[in-house]
């Protein structure tokens, strides 16, 4: 099958799902438990939840997908995925796929993306801009802050320009030799000096992940340290992918025939070749679109964000849902 004859599926991406009780998770952008419950009601009213590997079976012709199939995917391995999401899904009989990061789950390291979110919640963005630009000025080999502003001071569909600027510089725009100590210093001084303690609060542990697996949830890999693969050499990408597969070891899954989720959705030709050589069956990006299911595209499937669907169960289908009905 080609083009519009191929099966169409919706894959939704979730990150933090939190209660109203506060704690460190409250510092991270995410979905409240009540909003997640409402969104799940919407999903069940307008879609048919399926497992991630049902898409593989549909691609090879061994399994037909139901009307409006949808896959719920949960990235990074947050504690709320076990404490909040899992019981709700189990009660509703809804399958899902979970992609914990190996270093967070096993080594109890806090992911840079979460360090930066915590940093942004602990200080004004104006103060952070000043601290980041002071670090740039302190490195004579770097371009002046004005050049970084020209490239990165741009709003996104989620954040204003000044927040995007701080995020991008701390995530990847600054050289590793500058960015790494700066992120660690800001986290230590503004958030906590106990990184393992923060990780224990933010992320689920191996025993909890095993409970999800035993209950029939799909477990996939999402990077060893949540690094952007295209920024790495081919050999470094191989190390990042192989390290990610430690998550499969935790739940006793084989290191072949697995599901992978690219950190930040980013990949290149090397990434795909390395996953194919390791017999990865399906991989997800963050490109916002519905997925046309075909064997040759299973390693680059798009996902929409939780924010792309309503968080009320009693509303009319939105544009994404109407599109999911297209033949």
Image: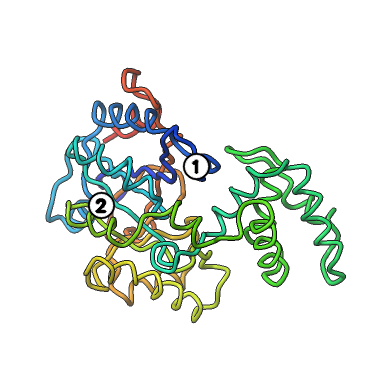
Seen at 24% across and 59% down, the residue is 210
Q: Residue 82: give x, y in percent of width and height.
A: 31, 48
Whether residue 213 sits left or right of residue 242 in the image: it is left
| Dot in front, 2 or 1 | 1
Q: What is the CA distance from the residue labelled 2 to the residue labelled 1?
A: 32 Å
Judged from this view, the residue extending furthest toward the bottom is: 235
Circle 1: element type: loop
Whether residue 305 sits left or right of residue 40 in the image: it is right
Q: Residue 242: give x, y in percent of width and height.
A: 39, 75
Image: 164 above or below 172: above
How many other residues sit within 10 Å of disc 1, few (<14), some (14-19) or many (≥20)? few
Residue 16, image quadrant: top left
Residue 170, image quadrant: bottom right
Judged from this view, the residue extending furthest toward the left is: 62
Mark identifier at residue 52 = 2
How many other residues sit within 10 Å of disc 2, few (<14), some (14-19) or many (≥20)? many
Q: Residue 45: give x, y in percent of width and height.
A: 24, 26
Circle 2: element type: helix
Mark identifier at residue 298 = none
**Residue 296 in sight here:** no
Image: 39 above or below 135: above
Seen at 83% across and 64% down, the residue is 143
Instruction: Tell me the residue that label 1 is attached to.
Output: 23
Seen at 64% across and 49% down, the residue is 119
Location of the C terminus by quadrant is top left
Judging depth in this view, the residue of 85 and 266 nearest the camera is 85
Ranked by sequence position, the earlier of labels 2 and 1 is: 1
Q: Residue 54: give x, y in percent of width and height.
A: 19, 51
């Amino acid at each position: 099958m080609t083009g519009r004859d191929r099966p169409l599926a919706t894959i939704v991406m979730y990150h933090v799902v939190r209660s109203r009780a506060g704690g460190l998770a409250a510092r991270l952008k995410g979905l409240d438990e009540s909003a997640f419950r409402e969104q799940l009601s919407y999903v069940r009213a307008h879609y048919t939840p399926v497992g991630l590997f049902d898409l593989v079976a549909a691609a090879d012709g061994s399994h037909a997908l139901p009307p409006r199939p949808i896959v719920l995917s949960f990235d990074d391995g947050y504690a709320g995925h076990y404490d909040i999401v899992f019981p709700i899904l189990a009660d509703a009989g809804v399958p899902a796929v979970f992609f914990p990061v190996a270093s967070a789950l096993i080594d109890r390291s806090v992911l840079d993306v979460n360090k930066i979110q915590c940093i942004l919640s602990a200080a004004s963005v104006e103060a952070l801009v000043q601290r980041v630009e002071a670090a740039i000025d302190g490195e004579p080999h770097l371009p002046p802050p004005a050049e970084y502003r020209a490239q990165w001071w741009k709003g996104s569909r989620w954040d204003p320009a000044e927040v995007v600027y701080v995020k991008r510089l701390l995530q990847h725009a600054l050289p590793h030799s500058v960015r790494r100590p700066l992120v660690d210093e800001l986290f230590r001084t503004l958030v906590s000096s106990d990184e393992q303690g923060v990780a224990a609060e933010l992320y689920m542990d191996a025993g909890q992940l095993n409970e999800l697996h035993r209950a029939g949830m799909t477990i996939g890999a999402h990077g060893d340290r949540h690094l952007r693969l295209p920024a790495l050499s081919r050999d470094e990408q191989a190390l990042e992918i192989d390290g990610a597969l430690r998550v499969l070891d935790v739940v006793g899954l084989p290191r072949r025939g697995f599901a992978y989720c690219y950190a930040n959705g980013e990949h290149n030709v090397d990434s795909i070749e390395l996953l194919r050589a390791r017999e990865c069956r399906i991989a997800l990006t963050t490109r916002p679109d519905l997925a046309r299911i075909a064997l040759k595209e299973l390693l680059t499937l798009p996902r929409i964000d939780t924010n792309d669907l309503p968080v009320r169960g009693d509303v009319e289908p939105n544009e994404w849902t109407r599109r999911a009905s297209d033949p």
